[in-house]
């Protein structure tokens, strides 16, 4: 089945650790996105990529990094510079101007 | 800059009641897209509808209907005869080009709908 997978579903990070969230899609979409959702809030864009080997900062990129070496994959690293990383992270993909399709999300908690 | 406002933070209705979720948007673009997504308790966002700025026809899909009015910059969503399974957070989103020239979605903060049996 075509879709977007994210792993892990739950992730726990200690202070000072970097962690990487996985996002894979088999929809053959060019564009991929990472969003952060905090309780009672909407989605805020962290990074996006419109094509392989290219990505752009979104509204809240500080403390995060990404790579786009393959069309299907867009991993997000939450670095130790991100002071408040506890949140729900959603990955999405889309083809050009069409709707974005979302993965199931990763819930990150800092211990 | 683009902006989406969902003024209703939370709504509770009794099952079988109709409910309308409001969405007001701001954009300077002449061509843009509007979306509604549903986020059930599981967390994954489910796409419901896309509308482009040139198509003001209302749309009905089963118990769901959407009213797009450019004159008031609104894209409201109505659920008829609500059911418990409709309980979720609903997001309105606006698609357009950012200052950097790339296409992005701007989301409202969502409306949490609770349908009481």
Image (cartoon, coloured by chain):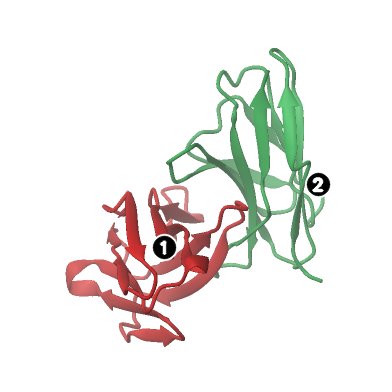
Q: Nearer the viewer, residue B59 or B26?
A: B59
Whether the residues at callouts 1 and 2 have beta carbons within 8 Å, the answer is no
Residue placed furthest toward the left: B71
The answer to whether B51 is drawn above or below residue A27 in the figure is below
In the structure shown, which secondary structural element does the residue marked by tag 1 occupy? strand
Residue B109 position within the rendered picture, expressed as x and y whole percent measured from the top left: 39, 48
Q: Which mark is residue A74?
A: none
Judge from the rendering whether residue B52 lies leftward or rightward of residue A105; answer left or right: left
Q: Which mark is residue A69?
A: 2
Q: Residues within 10 Å of mark 1 (few under 14, many from 20)?
A: many
In the structure shown, which secondary structural element does the residue marked by tag 2 occupy? loop
Residue A110 position within the rendered picture, expressed as x and y whole percent measured from the top left: 66, 21
User: Which residue is under mark 1?
Assistant: B115
Judge from the rendering whether residue A59 lies leftward or rightward of residue A102; answer left or right: left
Q: Is residue B3 visible in this depiction of the protein?
A: no
**At 47% from the left edge and 61% from the top edge, which residue is drawn?**
B87
Q: Residues within 10 Å of mark 2 (few under 14, many from 20)?
A: few
Read off the chain for label 2: A
């Amino acid at each position: 089945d075509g879709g977007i997978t994210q792993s892990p579903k739950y992730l726990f990070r200690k202070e000072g650790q970097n962690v990487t969230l996985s996002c894979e899609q088999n929809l053959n979409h060019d564009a991929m996105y990472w969003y952060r959702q905090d309780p009672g809030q909407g989605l805020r864009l962290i990074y996006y990529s419109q094509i392989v080997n290219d990505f752009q900062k979104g509204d809240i990129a500080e403390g995060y990094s990404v790579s786009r070496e393959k069309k299907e994959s867009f991993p997000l690293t939450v670095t130790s510079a991100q002071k408040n990383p506890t949140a729900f992270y959603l990955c999405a993909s889309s083809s050009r101007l069409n709707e974005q399709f979302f993965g199931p999300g990763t819930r990150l908690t800092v211990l | 800059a683009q902006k989406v406002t969902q003024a209703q933070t939370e709504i509770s209705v009794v099952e079988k009641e109709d409910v309308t979720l409001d969405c007001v948007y701001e954009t300077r673009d002449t061509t843009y897209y509007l979306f509604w997504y549903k986020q059930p308790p599981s967390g994954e966002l489910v796409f419901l509808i896309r509308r482009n700025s040139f198509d003001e026809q209302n749309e009905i899909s089963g118990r769901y209907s959407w009213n797009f009015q450019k004159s008031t910059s609104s894209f409201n969503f109505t659920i008829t005869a609500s059911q418990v399974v409709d309980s979720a957070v609903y997001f309105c989103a606006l698609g357009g080009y950012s200052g950097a020239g790339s296409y992005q979605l701007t989301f409202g903060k969502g409306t949490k709908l609770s349908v009481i049996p």
